[in-house]
Structure formats: structure tokens, C-alpha cells
Image (cartoon, helix red, strand yellow):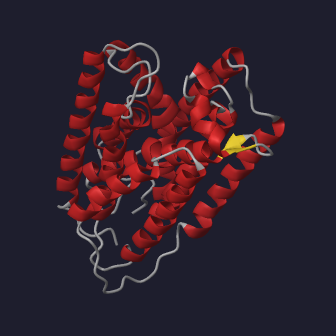
Amino acid sequence: MDQTAPREPFVRRLAPALGLALLAPVCAEMLSGYDATTGDPAALLMTILFGAALYGAPALLIRETARRAGLGWAGVLLLAAALGTVQAGIIDQSLFSTDYRGIDYWDEMTRPTWIDPLGLSASAALTFIGGHTLWSFTAPIAIVEAVDGREPPRPWLRAPGLAVTALLYLAAAWLVLRDHLANERDHASAAQLTGAAATAALLIALAFLLGRKRKRPVPRRVPPPAALLPAAAAALIAANWTPTWTGVAVTASLAIGGGAAIAHWSRSETWTRRHPTALAAGALLAVVLPSFLTDPIGETDPVAKYANNTAMTLLVAALAWWALRRAARTAPPR
């Protein structure tokens, strides 16, 4: 049967697509509690609705592309990194900014690892691109796919849905770029824009070159999902320890070491869908738990802030429980 046009009810296909479109902006903008919308229900709702186009649409395009092309999670991560580079380097241009949105702590976050020839901060680059890769795109995809529960994962959208999704993404991206050009005084140079575009293109090419590679499963012990979840959360919290060169070294070491370990374990015969689901849940906990210590931009009522933090933490806990429970019912992804 042609997997690009599964004979399934419209609602059955649309529900997980809508779920991903709505979850992606929550993970991208709300879990950390940094924005001025924190604690403001009306502003949070508008963020979700607009973010469904800015973050949810590219998450859907990544997911649909990967499933149609037969890409594994390595391919998903590379596609997510490509669109994360586009988001931070071309759309909102925060990657190259020296004074983004007038944020008080911007210098403290970027200057210690500033690379003048490139016009960017190494620490900020890891934070922004890595943040979009994991939290805006990959983790929401893993959670919603686990909840969806179909094995193997099937495409959710057909050609009209893909076209509408792409148009919504382009429209949202243009609005953000136009706002940046109109209201920010620090814009990316032509060389920086070219570099960001070239990097994104390279990552997309690597996704298709490396993402399809499959190796025969081997007998190998792997940690249980219950251990991977807190380990992923702890590692990612440690990776955001400090915006210094020491912090960059720690983040790079954790990324390389963690990635190598996951690649090693994922070849095991006992690696199931619960394992990547646990890693995604741990990633979400790593951003929502420190939110209680985050000072939002602007003035925010403390009661509203902590109520917002608590609500987001409960949401993540509920989603993690639901996704892991659903993933336990499915066969290994091989």
C-alpha cells in the first residue's frame, strides 16, 4: 500500500497533525517562562496560535518529510537543525544580534563567547540552534508520534495539507522577518545570511545522506526508559550551565558523548519506541523545571509567573506519562 496516501479517516490523520502544530510553539516559547507573555493567558493563547504557523508548521514539514523519505531520528534531528538555523539565522536573526529585543542580559549571554569574524556568540549559537532542534521540533515530534501510536509511523498530511502548511510557515516567517527589519537596529549581513542558508542546505543534504542508513540490530543491553528520562533532563540542564567557553566545552562534550551513547544503544534489539519517547520527555523537563528560576522579560506578577510555571510543568508531566504509556503498547520501531 502506498504510505503517502494511507486509507484512514480524515480526523484520524488530522488529530496528531494539529496536536504537533499546537505543541511545538508551547515547547518553543512557553516552557522556559522567559517571555513577557508568561502568566498572561490571552497573550499565551495568541502565541500558540501564531506559533502554530511559525513552529508547528515546520515541525510538521520535518516530520512528514522524514516519514515519507524513510529517515530515522538522525535524519529528523538534522532536518530540525537545518530549520533551527533558518529560524535563528535568517528569520528572527537573533543568532547575529548584539542587542536583541532590548533584553537586559543579552550582553551577559553573548559577549563571553563572541566570535568577531563570524559576528555571533558560540554559546548563543548552541543555545538557539540546539534549542530549536530539540524543543521546537524534535521533542514535540517524538511525543506526538508516541501518543499517535501507529507503527510504523505513517504520514498525516496529503498534498493539499502539505501545501497549506508550507504557506502558513512562509507567511509567519515573513511577518517575523518584517517585524525584525522594522523594529531592530541590528540586522544580519549578506555574508551571515548566506552562511546560515548554506549551513541549513548542508544539514538537509546530510539528513538524506545519513538519515536512511540502517544497521542490523544486535544483542546489546540498553538503559531502561525510566533511567533515560532523568538522565536526559540532567544532561540538558547541565549543558545550559553557563554562557562561557567552559560552558560551550561542557555542552559540546555532552552533545557528542550523549549522541554517541544513543547511537550505540539504538542499534540494540531491545531498543523500543519508549526509549526515544523517554529522551524527548527528559528534554522537555530540562527546560520546564528551571523555568521557576527564570526572570521573564518585562514586568510579570510573581503569582502569575509561578502559576504559569506550575501549569507548564504539569502539562509536561501529563504528556510524558501519556506518551510513554502509549509507546509501551507498540512494537519496537524496527
Q: Quadrant of the N terminus?
A: bottom left
Q: Could you say where residue 43 lies in the image, as x and y percent from the top left?
A: 39, 15
**Quarter assignment of residue 296:** top left
Determine the residue positioned at 62% across, 25% down. 100
Q: Is residue 158 among the parts visible in the rendering? A: no
**Quarter assignment of residue 48:** top left
In the displayed structure, does residue 279 sit left or right of residue 47?
A: left
Q: Nearer the viewer, residue 70 or 230?
A: 230
Determine the residue positioned at 31% across, 16% down. 41
In the displayed structure, does residue 278 sit left or right of residue 213?
A: left
Q: Could you say where residue 33 lies in the image, as x and y percent from the top left?
A: 38, 29
Q: Quadrant of the C terminus?
A: bottom left
Determine the residue positioned at 68% across, 19% down. 184
Q: Could you say where residue 103 lies in the image, as x and y percent from the top left?
A: 56, 23
Q: Could you say where residue 153 lies in the image, as x and y percent from the top left?
A: 35, 58
In the displayed structure, does residue 176 sit left or right of residue 31?
A: right
Q: Nearer the viewer, residue 158 or 37?
A: 37
175 vs 243: above or below? above
Q: Is residue 25 among the parts visible in the rendering? A: yes
Count of marks overlaid on the render: 0
Q: Nearer the viewer, residue 89 or 251?
A: 251
In the displayed structure, does residue 147 sit left or right of residue 201?
A: left
Determine the residue positioned at 31% across, 32% down. 292
227 vs 300: above or below? below
